[in-house]
Image (cartoon, rainbow, N blue to C red):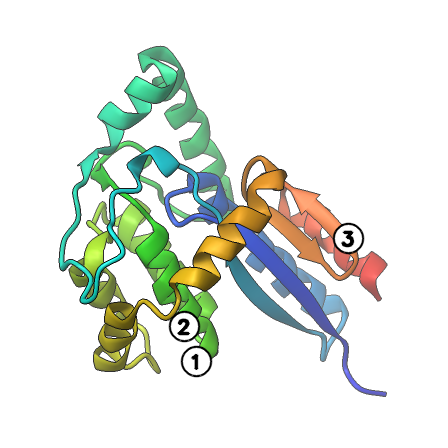
Amino acid sequence: MAAPVIPISIVSDVVCPWCYVGIAQLQKAMRKFQQSHPGASFKLTWHAFELNPDLDRIPLTCPVPETVPVISKFDYLVSKFGRGVAERGSELLNQRAHAAGIEINGSSGVIGPTKLVHEALVYAREKDKQTEFMLALFEAHFGKSENIFGKAGIIKVAATVDGLDVTELGDYLNSRKGNKIVEDEIKMNRYIGGVPHYTIGKYEVHGGQDADTFVKVFEHTM
């Protein structure tokens, strides 16, 4: 009997801190599940969601810009939620991130439009390097407070991922081949209302969950 492969479809945005916490918890669950189910494996696929459409300022041009307009992440959060909510949310996020085994600088650095980043992730999906690239983007944005927006920032992160050809990726971004795929995914995923959102086999899981919750879902897929 062939070892089970559990498909996991993840709708997320690279500027979503709870998506970063979510993948950390999901990976913990995957490792725990594999301990009790040797041979089990997972196939992860990431799909685009635009958390802050008001920041979408990238015109459909070829070639794409090396840099794009960005603003202070903290100032943006304050303008969107208010200072009190932003500060309390940052404290809760730090607690959840620590529990998941990651460090998040939730309010430092800059924030910008993410459609171009999603186009790069479509390219990485074609190369079977999407999860590695997404994790590198999360770490760069939330762990190191780097500017990952615009072609230059995307290429810088991609250069840290084995198996991604940055010259080929640059050409792909300049061609805008991934734009329609990203636009269609964003349009299709608007019904979700928020991210992260997971489809695990036939089961849907929404929002930040702990590892044990994911393990229970894995069990039901067997």
Question: Relative to 35, is 172 on the left or the right?
Answer: left
Q: Residues within 10 Å of mark 2 (few under 14, many from 20)?
A: many
Q: In which quarter of the image is the C terminus?
A: bottom right
Say what amino acid the circle numbered 2 marks.
Answer: Ala
Label annotation for residue 203: 3
Q: Which of 142 and 166 is in front in this view?
A: 166
What residue does disc 1 label? Answer: 127
Residue at the farthest bottom position: 1
Compare marks 3 and 2 and give the one earlier in the sequence: 2
Instruction: Tell me which corner region of the image, top left, top right, bottom left or bottom right, holds residue 65.
Output: bottom left
Where is residue 119 drawn, in percent x and y? 37, 63
Say what amino acid the circle numbered 3 marks.
Answer: Tyr
Q: Which of 174 and 219 is in front in this view?
A: 174
The answer to whether any part of residue 23 appears in the image is: no
Q: Which residue is drawn at 53% across and 47% down?
A: 187
Question: Relative to 204, is 222 on the left or the right?
Answer: right
Where is residue 163 drawn, in percent x and y? 35, 82
Q: Which residue is drawn at 58% across and 35% down?
A: 193
The answer to whether any part of residue 185 appears in the image is: yes
Label annotation for residue 156: none
Q: Which of 63 and 55 is in front in this view?
A: 63
What residue does disc 2 label? Answer: 124
What is the number of callouts on the image? Answer: 3
Compare marks 3 and 1 and give the one earlier in the sequence: 1
**3D distance between C-alphas at marks 2 and 1:** 5 Å
